[in-house]
């Protein structure tokens, strides 16, 4: 399978705990995006990387959130001191950036439930 | 400010009916791209189509067709002879080419399509 993969697919945690999600993009895709999707809504942009550089972060990404993409391959998204409002589906997408437009290919997502 | 509106929250049709999903967008950029994605119950977003702001030609792909009209800022999606497998949530999305070239997608709220046998 050469698509975008995410791990874990589901995560249940208690409020105040830290969680980390992993995304493996399509091989050789230089851009990687994180989105958050709450129930009944469309995905919202959180941040993106070009290779290993994090180039933009949304206002949605509070100080409790941190993302990395060491070596420009897989990426991790960590949420510290989780809150119930963090419950959502976290989607990762990758693309091969060649110019003004790119088609993003999405992974299956990680569904986070904060109790 | 950029925005995508999908006014239809849910649509229910009977198999073989045609159905149109509406999408209206707002942007100040002159160069932008519009997308449609499908999200089946499994959750993974599947890319369907991309159009750029300079190409208003309608496109047909099998039972799918798209109508892009800059004059009304709309990019509607029609499924002809719908099938049960078309049941999913459909998202329209916008990407602005001149906003730092981030490529980030701005999604609408989605339209849930239910096709009944």
Image (cartoon, coloured by chain):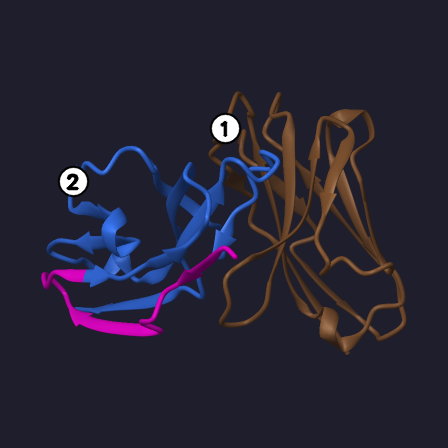
Chain colours: A brown, B blue
Front in this rendered view, residue B62 or A2? B62
Seen at 72% across and 26% down, the residue is: A51
User: What is the chain letter for disc 2?
Assistant: B
* B64 horizontally vs A102: left or right: left
Q: Secondary structure at mark 2?
A: loop
- The residue tagged 1 is A100
Vertical order, A71 against B47 (above or below): above
- Position of the C terminus of chain A, as image quadrant, is bottom right
Q: Which residues are magenta?
A: B1-19
* B71 horizontally vs A87: left or right: left
Front in this rendered view, residue B26 or A81? B26
User: What is the chain letter for disc 1?
Assistant: A
Q: Position of residue B116 (x, y in %)?
A: 20, 71
Vertical order, A13 against A19 (above or below): below
Q: Secondary structure at mark 1?
A: loop
Number of the label disc, if any, that sits on residue B62: 2
- Count residues near mark 1 (Cα–Cα under 10 Å), then give few for <14, some for 14-19, many for 20+: some
Q: CA distance from mark 1 to mark 2?
A: 28 Å
- Count residues near mark 2 (Cα–Cα under 10 Å), then give few for <14, some for 14-19, many for 20+: few
- Does B58 appear in magenta? no
Asked whether the residues under marks 1 and 2 belong to the same chain, the reply is: no
**How many circles with numbers are drawn on the protein?**
2
């Amino acid at each position: 399978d050469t698509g975008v993969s995410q791990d874990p697919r589901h995560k249940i945690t208690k409020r105040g705990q830290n969680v980390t999600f992993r995304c493996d993009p399509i091989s050789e895709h230089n851009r990687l995006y994180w989105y958050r999707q709450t129930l009944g809504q469309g995905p919202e942009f959180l941040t993106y990387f070009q290779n290993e550089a994090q180039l933009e972060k949304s206002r949605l990404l509070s100080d409790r959130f941190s993302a990395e993409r060491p070596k420009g391959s897989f990426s991790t998204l960590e949420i510290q001191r989780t809150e119930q409002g963090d419950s959502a589906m976290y989607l990762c997408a990758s693309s091969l950036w060649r110019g003004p437009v790119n088609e993003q290919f999405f992974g299956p997502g990680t569904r986070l439930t904060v109790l | 400010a950029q925005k995508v509106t999908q006014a239809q929250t849910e649509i229910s049709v009977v198999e073989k009916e045609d159905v149109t999903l509406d999408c209206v967008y707002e942007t100040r950029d002159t160069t932008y791209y519009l997308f449609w994605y499908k999200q089946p119950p499994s959750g993974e977003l599947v890319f369907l189509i991309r159009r750029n702001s300079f190409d208003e030609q309608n496109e047909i792909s099998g039972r799918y067709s798209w109508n892009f009209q800059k004059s009304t800022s709309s990019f509607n999606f029609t499924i002809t002879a719908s099938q049960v497998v078309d049941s999913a949530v459909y998202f329209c999305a916008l990407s602005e080419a001149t906003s730092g070239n981030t490529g980030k997608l701005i999604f609408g709220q989605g339209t849930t399509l239910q096709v009944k046998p």
